[in-house]
Image: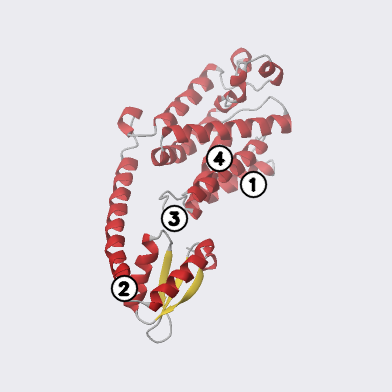
């Protein structure tokens, strides 16, 4: 974690005191780090700037009675809690390892698989946009939405206009979607997908009309959610690698500069911003 995002709140005389106090902060859900200072002193750093005042108050309390039983009990409680979190992390890792099969084998990821199948089915049914009859059933035509065809607000995500367009999106959807669905559950994942699909489709329609399709707006929404929440909620446990971030941002930039042909840039940006906003709200709630 970047030191720029943390704040020091003071020092303690020994490493043992720093460890005990860090455990005390931990059981109060205040993320902290310790590091050696000059001499034998240790500096206490608070990760969340909004908890700095609370951390300073607890530090003053600790300094006034460092041998109080509540602090030593906190060390035992922190150790037990860390063991529980490690066990939970191992279980989550095992789930992710098992996520390569069909939905009934994955213990999660079922909706992601359903979205993958729907995109493939729509791709071949529409002949990747060449079959106008089937394609028109999925486009976002606002006049038909006003007539009650509400599904059109969402169905453009299933349209793809080449096999490469489809494969690119499915690879990212499988990677990001499975990880997030397993972590937060299918219903919450479904709500995020629906919200991002709606926002990205409407934004792209407003920018360029009805002739667009692709689930890449949702992909960027999932990326934004994972990236923002992973950076702001250290207990979330799912992080986007720098390689993944770099590749998706490069693709975003190539689309902006027109190097990929016709690209749904409004869907990409609105999806990214919408997913990031949802990730930030989730991180705030913890």
What is the C-alpha distance between the residues marked 4 and 1? 16 Å
Q: Nearer the viewer, mark 1 or mark 2?
A: 2
> Circle 3 is placed at which residue position?
234
Task: For label 2, count other residues whose C-alpha is less than 10 Å away and answer few (under 14), some (14-19) or many (20+).
Answer: few
> Circle 2 is placed at which residue position?
68
**Residue 243 place in picture, x, y as percent:** 49, 51
What is the C-alpha distance between the residues marked 4 and 2? 48 Å
Q: Earlier in the sequence, mark 4 or mark 1?
A: 4
What is the C-alpha distance between the residues marked 1 and 2? 57 Å
What is the C-alpha distance between the residues marked 3 and 4? 20 Å
What is the C-alpha distance between the residues marked 3 and 2? 29 Å
Task: For label 4, count other residues whose C-alpha is less than 10 Å away and answer few (under 14), some (14-19) or many (20+).
Answer: many
Q: Residue at x 68, y 43 (%)?
A: 256
> Circle 1 is placed at which residue position?
253
Under tag 1, what secondary structure?
helix
36 vs 205: above or below: below
Closer to the camera in the image, 259 or 212: 212
What is the C-alpha distance between the residues marked 3 and 1? 29 Å
Quarter of the image where one finds residue 79 = bottom left
Q: Earlier in the sequence, mark 3 or mark 4?
A: 4
Closer to the camera in the image, 94 or 28: 28
> Circle 4 is placed at which residue position?
221
Quarter of the image where one finds residue 145 = top right
Under tag 4, what secondary structure?
helix
**Residue 52 place in picture, x, y as percent:** 51, 66
Task: Point out the residue furthest to the top here.
Answer: 133
Q: Residue at x 56, y 42 (%)?
A: 275
């Amino acid at each position: 974690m970047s030191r720029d995002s943390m704040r020091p709140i003071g020092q303690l005389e020994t490493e043992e005191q720093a460890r005990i106090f860090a455990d005390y902060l931990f059981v109060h859900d205040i993320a902290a780090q310790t590091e050696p200072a000059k001499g034998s002193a240790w500096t206490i750093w608070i990760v969340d700037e909004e908890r700095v005042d609370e951390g300073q108050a607890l530090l003053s309390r600790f300094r006034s009675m460092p041998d109080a039983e509540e602090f030593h009990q906190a060390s035992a409680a922190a150790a037990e809690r860390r063991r529980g979190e490690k066990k939970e992390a191992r279980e989550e890792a095992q789930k992710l390892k098992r996520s390569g099969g069909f939905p009934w084998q994955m213990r999660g990821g079922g909706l992601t698989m359903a979205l993958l199948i729907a995109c493939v089915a729509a791709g071949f049914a529409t002949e990747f946009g060449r079959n106008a009859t089937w394609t028109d059933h999925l486009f976002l035509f606002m006049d038909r939405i006003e007539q009650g065809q509400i599904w059109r607000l969402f169905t453009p995500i299933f349209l793809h206009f080449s096999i490469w367009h489809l494969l690119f999106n499915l690879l990212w959807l499988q990677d990001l979607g499975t990880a997030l669905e397993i972590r937060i559950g299918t219903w919450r994942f479904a709500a995020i997908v629906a919200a991002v699909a709606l926002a990205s489709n409407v934004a792209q329609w407003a920018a360029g009309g009805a002739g667009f399709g692709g689930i890449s707006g949702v992909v960027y929404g999932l990326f934004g959610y994972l990236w923002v929440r992973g950076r702001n909620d250290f207990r979330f446990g799912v992080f986007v690698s720098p390689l993944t971030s770099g590749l998706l941002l490069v693709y975003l930039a190539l689309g902006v500069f027109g190097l990929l042909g016709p690209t749904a840039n409004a869907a990409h940006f609105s999806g990214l911003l919408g997913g990031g906003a949802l990730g930030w709200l989730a991180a705030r709630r913890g």
